[in-house]
Image: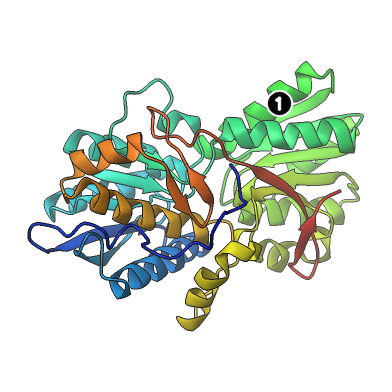
Amino acid sequence: MQFRHKSVFVAATLAVLGSAAQAETVKIAIAGPFSGSVAQYGDMVKAGALTAIEQINAAGGAGGNKLEAVMMDDACEPKQAVAVANKIVSQKIKYVIGHVCSGSTIPASDIYENEGIVMVTPSATAPQLTEGKKRQFIFRTIGRDDQQGPAAAQYIITKVKPKKVAILHDKQSYGQGIATSVKKDLEAAKIPVAVFEGINAGDSDYSAVITKLKSQGVDFVYFGGYHPEMGLLMRQAREQGVKAAFMGPEGVGNKDVTAIAGAASEGMLVTLPADFAADPANVKVVKAFADSKRDANGPFQMPAYAGVSIIANAIAGAKSTDPAKVADYMHKHPFQTPIGMVNYDTSGDLRLFKFVVYKWHKDATKTVAN
């Protein structure tokens, strides 16, 4: 995705164009984990979506229609996500920002597609969400694992050049999917993958797999999953004398990984979306976050903001709040957003999205990796 803008992005530039025949309140469900071990990611999405809704309403609404957020907690649990999706259907809500975790997004998306509800996920990267499916109402404002995985693998191959690799995952759609993608590319480059194994998310003791890392003499570990497990793996590995470097996807790029791992988090590599909050074109958007006492820094705030702005601009462009017309407009038109120019393919995936490799530090800051 191109991140250079010809002009400063202004919230709802198109959203105020074209008044609706009769203004109405358009409810948008914000669905994600607002409780549980990965609630931080839900909070990022919430911050982005609410800031966008406030800015769009202040600018006149989506084609003259006011937007209203409805919070829905799925705790990153697939069964709860299905319950949330059915609740959204019963409440006749036609637009969703979310879900957040791929494992929750996939089953919920089937319900939205069947019911004609537009869903834009700012964080679910698993290809299975759209792969091989005819999707009219399902969209993303983030890249897929088969874009993120190759970015990680290319860095490992060209920069790290390890002698022996272990690839671990949490046995879930997101983690296992991206781990498999990385494994495929490393093996194609003739880099030995000595260990490919799943761990149980939520466990507190990973000594068995760490013993295997030691016995195999691995010097690099890639983990597909989320920060609670990554933090424990790094801390316990260092405690047991494993000096291998660690790398993970955006699910581990959370300051709480340092709260768990401590000094062992120093040097962790992580693929993340570009730092949209640092883009000079987003100065006004970042200020809007700050004015609302929200943090714009994180992997999912700007994609969530972009998701709301795309829905709003599509409502204005289609001159309708009918989700079918709005979805059709989204498929056929580009959108200028804080994450760059968004163009969708027929599956609702971004035609291009750039992941950047960062180096994590023990003070929970990050810098672009060399």
On the image, the x and y values in percent for residue 239 come to 85, 56
Q: Nearer the viewer, residue 213 or 283?
A: 283
Q: Residue at x 49, y 48 (%)?
A: 123
Q: Residue at x 33, y 41 (%)?
A: 330
Q: Residues within 10 Å of mark 1 (few under 14, many from 20)?
A: many
On the image, the x and y values in percent for residue 269 come to 77, 49
Q: Where is the N terminus found, in terms of image quarters?
A: top right
Q: Left of 309 or right of it: where is 314?
A: left
Q: Left of 162 or right of it: where is 251?
A: left
**Residue type at numbered disc 1:** Lys
* Residue 214 appearing in the image: no
On the image, the x and y values in percent for residue 170 come to 59, 40
* Residue 267 appearing in the image: yes
On the image, the x and y values in percent for residue 105 come to 38, 43
Labels in figure, total: 1
Q: Nearer the viewer, residue 339 or 146?
A: 339
- Measured along the vertical axis of the image, is residue 285 above or below residue 164? below
- Measured along the vertical axis of the image, is residue 191 above or below residue 220? above
Residue situated furthest front in the rendering: 6
Q: Residue at x 75, y 66 (%)?
A: 365
- Measured along the vertical axis of the image, is residue 227 above or below residue 158? below
Q: Which residue is mark 1?
A: 183
Q: Left of 334 or right of it: where is 244?
A: right
